[in-house]
Image (cartoon, grey):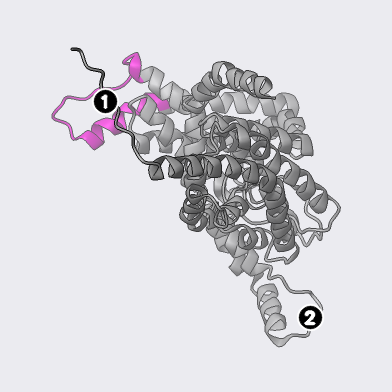
Amino acid sequence: MSTLYNHMVDIIEQKVSPVAAKMGQQKYVMAIRDGFIAALPFMIVGSFILVFVFPPFSADTTWSFARGWLDLSAKYRDQLMLPFNLSMGVMTLFISVGIAASLARHHNLDPLTTGLLSLMSFLLVAAPLKDGTISMQYLSGQGIFTAIITAIYSTEVYGLLKRKNITIKLPPEVPTGVARSFEILIPVLAIILTLHPLNLIIEAETGMIIPQAIMALIQPLVSASDSLPAVLLAVFICQILWFAGIHGSLIVTGIMNPFWMANLSANQMAMAAGATTMPHIFLQGFWDHYLLIGGVGSTLPLAILLMRSKAVHLRTIGKMGIVPGLFNINEPILFGAPIIMNPVFFLPFILVPMINAVFAWFAVDLGLVARVVSLTPWTTPGPIGASWAANWAVSPVILSLFCMCSAALMYLPFLKAYEKQLLEKEALEEQQKSSPKVNATPASTH
């Protein structure tokens, strides 16, 4: 077992870690991640509005408070939905600007100017004008991949033209803002002359504009992302990287966010249309509140167990980690216990979230647990966040608590084994402290 573990650690350190580290620092991955983080506040508030418009009450309820809320929502549905439509409904606008602004820093470009260029690029291909009205169809989740591509394309074109000095330069005496406006003229023209004709050609040949064509191409990938194998693969990669000391969550969520947002948008559209069953399972709320309860590895239950440990070291770490763990921050546990690169915790750290993923997937897939329809902050405590994400249903709370109990049971035997090692070490140290010191007398040289 020890030989197998050492062999696996060598593979992680020599093969996996270098690739993951490079991927985590890859400029496009970082820009996409930053773009979604920038858009997150707008999407969280928009999701909250949707929950308010569709309260968690039965349509035939006789409770006066619930009946009044439902009637109010039905009467003023269009007015109440406006904040949602201008936040979650246009999420791609925020994401487009955020990605380009982040990527601009890698090219020493002005983030604001680059973000606006990206916004124009996206609208040029994703917001067709008909009868004086702009379509909002691709401003939500369906246009996410188009927003990513146009943001990267427009920023790279701008950066290339500037590096080649293909810009309009004004004398130094001209104010910076005015000079920057003229500098962007050629990139704007280049974007229009490339993207707009391309969009027209694709539409003429296929009957689809660019966002439609992109969604048609990646639909198999989107469908595959919402499957149990995709969940298990994402969790496995995240856990392996974290065990090696690399922030696997940033890498995995950076890759999965576009799929999660597209699927969340589809669930919200189904909810707004009055559907009783949402189409997608694997969303960020599923990831955060069933698989990563207390942080990566679902370590909140472990923190509770540590607080009752007989080993002073583990008991201290448990007390330090319990409060941050409630809000899914578990660095005190990961590095204090430690779990990172600790062979005793290798198997449970990898397997706990994967086994819970199987439980959670089938519970949701069989209709026993409500599906995610809302975006929640990742720091929301597990059971509360699970309910919030599913429009305040009760069933996700039960599932989240079940996953916590499951994690505790799986961690317990490994914790006991590690605790035994530490207790033996503590006893030995205590024995050395209490034993009398013997002063050795050096031999005489006479």
Q: Amino acid at mark 1?
A: Thr
**Residue 359 at x, y percent in the picture:** 79, 48
Task: Look at 76% across and 50% down and name the residue there.
Answer: 360
| 112 lies above or below 306 | above
> Residue 441 bears which disc, if any?
1
Task: Look at 52% across and 19% down and name the residue there.
Answer: 18
**Could you say which quadrant of the image residue 163 lies in?**
top left
* Residue contact at pointers 1 and 2, CB within 8 angstroms: no
Viewport quadrant of the C terminus: top left
**Residue 151 at x, y percent in the picture:** 50, 32
**Could you say which quadrant of the image residue 358 lies in?**
top right
Q: Is residue 176 left or right of residue 361?
A: left
Task: Look at 78% across and 62% down and name the residue there.
Answer: 274
Can residue 34 be seen? yes
Helix, strand or loop at label 2? It is: loop
Q: Which residues are magenta?
A: 162-187
Q: CA distance from mark 1 to mark 2?
A: 91 Å
Q: Amino acid at mark 2?
A: Thr
Helix, strand or loop at label 1? It is: loop
Q: Nearer the viewer, residue 188 or 113?
A: 113
Q: Nearer the viewer, residue 416 or 122?
A: 416
